[in-house]
Image (spheres, grey):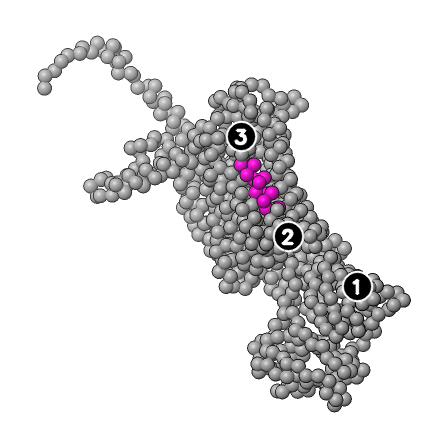
């Protein structure tokens, strides 16, 4: 998963305060792991990070379907709010870093914002309990919970990794580097496990008669609470440095003063300066101005980067919604649509060593200088190709959607249970003969396409004798069940059930009411009428029914598949075996395009992330002095935030078909990658170590210049008063 580093400064060596304890020195000896140079305290930090990432990604994995199926929002609104939440999570680190650096310190910032984090999870979980208030209450609780979670996760994001680094002494830099590798592994492990587990809790566990979103959100809440407890338990072992000042504020002040000063001296009478930041020299040091120049060069390169994240973060929204319209049966193992997101962290863990130990060294052997900016550009192209594949998958998926009648058309499915052939006639259409359905070798009848002006009558006759007439409306599909002396007609669905579920309704040809119960849902089929619709999960269904005699009977409906809409005709009762015989008709074809076809797009996107994100972070860090790395990390996180803003704007517009929207995003990223490569061509890399050398040379030069007082002693300079 795309994760950044820290925003706050590290490596300070001043006094420290224990949490809930008196002051102690950060240089004191702390327990180590098995006699190594690894402080025991890092175990608490790594476990804390694993649980926090589990809670965040676990909650986020089911969020889109929660909006769609629990709050009953449409796909565009669900996508919009999902990306607004993600964007807020990457804006809030800009708040957390200054709090840690200039006010509370890292430990206290993590502690207090973790409490906010836990409270947000609890509020979110309560909002997913159906019995708690109305829909408006659920929406309000969900939004309050998500905002608290965003401030919690964003606030601690820049602090935890830096706080872990603070636990190591300067002479243990190698151990610190290995710690960060383990830290990154804990992030991906938490993401990997939670992305698999929470969709199972949502889909395979039923509570309150539906998917158990309260449990799917409650378990991440419990993990976050456990993360807080673990973090506090290590309090006595931590090195806690006090706030040292916020470098972000210094950078903003420098830039702001340069702009203001340049504006105040915009007249031609003032000589131009080599760089616009040189206008800050009246107030800020030359060293700071030089460092800010280095940073702004890299930040300028960041301008096109949000487009990559606009595509990347749609794995949890548009791609998950795409998976709900596909067949997810892997030969007895059924995967939840939101579980497909597990492919990203899994592939990242596989692809990083493949690229680092295989692909990149092989390219180097070919004497190709594979620089960072070309790597990032190829990462963008791979992400665009992932959306090209997603477009093809979307088009193939749409082929299983029901055909909707056009203006001037109506579709009619005739279920002939009479004892002979029937004739369907309507003005402006040739008469059509429909044979008797054979229950022993039953096949779903094809829909008839009838030309309808607006609303007109359809007549059904048997052997010349009129059975029934009923109206058809343009742009609508109908089914009509025909018996010897009566017809039962009903309007048919023109779309698939939501979330990859199946739906079934019942036509009761018996003389008693039949109350049907399936998976905690109930519907009554009255004699000679069509029941309401029940939506349920895919599977082989044996429904329980209660006849007018209050006896339980079984109804074997067979397999109700992903996205299929069915009509079950209750035809006869077997009182001996307590079975109601039913004939199942498929009104809307089930999803036939397999979800495994999403694997290529996840592979391309994950490969793109390795080349873009990992390389981008390494390049950014190599181009800035040590004191400015937090500023670049802030800029990097903001590119993720702005990328999600792009998605919510496009989703809220909602004017394109989904496949066309995928093409739009892919084309935009290709265009942006071209712009980025041009910008990179003219970019001149810098070496921050040169700044250190300049500082050292400047100090040496100062030492070489003799002090004026010493010169006066050597040359015997005599002080005299002079009249002017």
Q: Give me the C-alpha separation between circle 1 and circle 2.
A: 26 Å
Judge from the rendering whether residue 566 lies leftward or rightward of residue 322; answer left or right: right
Q: Residue at x 59, y 78 (%)?
A: 474
| Position in image of residue 513 (x %, y %) | 77, 69
| Quarter of the image where the C terminus is located | top left
Residue holding disc 2: 130
Q: Residue furthest bottom?
A: 464
120 inside magenta stretch: yes
Mark positioned earlier in the residue sequence (3 or 1): 3
User: Badge 1: how crowded within 10 Å, few (<14), some, or many (20+)?
Assistant: many
Q: Does the CB distance between marks 3 and 1 fall below 8 Å?
A: no
Q: Tell me which corner region of the image, top left, top right, bottom left or bottom right, holds residue 472.
A: bottom right
Q: Residue furthest left?
A: 724
Stretch in magenta: 113-125
Q: Residue at x 48, y 51 (%)?
A: 645
Q: Give me the C-alpha separation between circle 3 and circle 2.
A: 37 Å
- Report the magenta stretch's main SS: helix
Mark positioned earlier in the residue sequence (3 or 2): 3
Q: How many marks?
A: 3
Q: Residue furthest right?
A: 576
Viewer-closest of 529 and 612: 529
| Position in image of residue 182 (x %, y %) | 61, 34
Viewer-closest of 185 and 242: 242
Viewer-closest of 440 and 671: 440
| Quarter of the image where the N terminus is located | top right
Residue holding disc 3: 107
Q: Which disc is residue 545 wearing?
A: 1
Q: Residue at x 41, y 45 (%)?
A: 300
């Amino acid at each position: 998963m795309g994760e950044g580093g820290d925003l706050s400064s590290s490596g300070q060596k001043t006094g420290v305060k224990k949490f809930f304890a008196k002051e102690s020195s950060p240089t004191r000896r702390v327990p180590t792991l098995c006699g190594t140079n690894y402080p025991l305290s890092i175990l608490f930090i790594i476990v804390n990070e694993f649980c926090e990432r589990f809670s965040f990604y676990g909650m986020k994995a089911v969020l889109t379907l929660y909006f769609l199926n629990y709050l009953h929002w449409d796909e565009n609104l669900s996508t919009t709010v999902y990306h607004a939440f993600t964007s807020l999570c990457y804006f809030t680190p800009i708040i957390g870093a200054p709090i840690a650096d200039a006010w509370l310190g890292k430990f206290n910032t993590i502690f207090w914002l973790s409490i906010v984090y836990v409270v947000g999870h609890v509020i979110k979980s309560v909002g997913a309990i159906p019995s708690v208030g109305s829909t408006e209450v659920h929406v309000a609780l969900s939004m309050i919970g998500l905002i608290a979670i965003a401030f919690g996760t964003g606030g601690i994001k820049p602090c935890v990794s830096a706080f872990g680094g603070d636990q190591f002494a300067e002479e243990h830099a190698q151990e610190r580097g290995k710690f960060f590798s383990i830290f990154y592994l804990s992030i991906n492990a938490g993401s990997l496990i939670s992305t698999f587990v929470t969709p199972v809790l949502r889909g395979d566990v039923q509570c309150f008669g539906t998917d158990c979103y309260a449990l799917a959100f409650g378990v991440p809440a419990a993990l976050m609470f456990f993360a807080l407890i673990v973090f506090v338990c290590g309090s006595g072992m931590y090195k806690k440095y006090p706030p040292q000042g916020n470098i972000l504020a210094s950078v903003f002040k420098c830039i702001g003063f340069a702009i203001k000063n340049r504006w105040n001296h915009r007249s031609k009478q003032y000589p131009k300066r080599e760089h616009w930041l040189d206008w800050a020299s009246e107030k800020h040091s030359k060293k700071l101005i030089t460092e800010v120049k280095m940073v702004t060069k890299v930040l300028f390169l960041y301008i096109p980067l949000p487009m990559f994240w606009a595509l990347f973060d749609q794995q949890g929204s548009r791609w998950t919604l795409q998976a709900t319209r596909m067949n997810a049966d892997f030969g007895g193992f059924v995967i939840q649509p939101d579980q497909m997101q597990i492919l990203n962290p899994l592939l990242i863990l596989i692809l990083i060593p493949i690229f680092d130990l295989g692909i990149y060294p092989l390219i180097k052997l070919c004497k190709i200088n594979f620089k960072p900016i070309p790597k990032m550009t190829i990462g963008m192209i791979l992400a665009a190709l992932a959306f090209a594949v997603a477009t093809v998958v979307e088009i193939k998926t749409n082929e299983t959607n029901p055909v909707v009648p056009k203006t001037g058309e109506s579709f009619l499915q005739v279920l002939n249970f009479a004892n002979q052939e029937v004739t369907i006639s309507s003005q402006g259409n040739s008469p059509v003969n429909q044979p008797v359905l054979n229950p022993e070798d039953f096949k779903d009848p094809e829909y008839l396409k009838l030309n309808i002006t607006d609303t007109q009558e359809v007549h059904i006759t048997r052997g010349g004798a009129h059975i029934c007439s009923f109206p058809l409306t343009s742009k609508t599909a109908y089914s009509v069940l025909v018996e010897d002396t009566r017809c039962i007609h009903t309007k048919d669905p023109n779309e698939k059930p939501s979330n990859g579920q199946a739906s079934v309704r019942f036509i009761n040809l018996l003389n008693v009411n039949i109350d049907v119960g399936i998976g905690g849902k109930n519907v009554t089929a009255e004699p000679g009428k069509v029941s309401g619709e029940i939506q349920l999960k895919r599977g082989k269904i044996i429904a329980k029914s209660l006849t007018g005699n209050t006896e339980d009977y079984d109804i074997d409906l067979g397999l109700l598949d992903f996205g299929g809409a069915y009509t079950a005709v209750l035809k006869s009762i077997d009182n001996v075996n307590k079975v109601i015989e039913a004939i199942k008709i498929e009104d809307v074809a089930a999803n036939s395009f397999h979800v495994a076809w999403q694997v290529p797009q996840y592979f391309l996107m994950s490969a793109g992330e390795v080349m873009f994100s990992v390389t981008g972070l390494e390049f950014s860090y190599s181009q800035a002095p040590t004191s400015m790395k937090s500023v670049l990390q802030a800029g990097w996180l903001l590119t993720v935030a702005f990328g999600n803003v792009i998605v919510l704007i496009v989703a809220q517009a909602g004017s394109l078909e989904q496949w066309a929207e995928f093409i739009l995003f892919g084309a935009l990223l290709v265009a942006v990658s071209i712009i980025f490569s041009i910008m990179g061509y003219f970019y001149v890399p810098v070496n921050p170590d040169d700044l250190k050398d300049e500082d050292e040379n400047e100090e040496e030069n100062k030492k070489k210049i003799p002090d004026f007082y010493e010169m006066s002693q050597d040359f015997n300079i005599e002080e005299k008063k002079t009249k002017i």
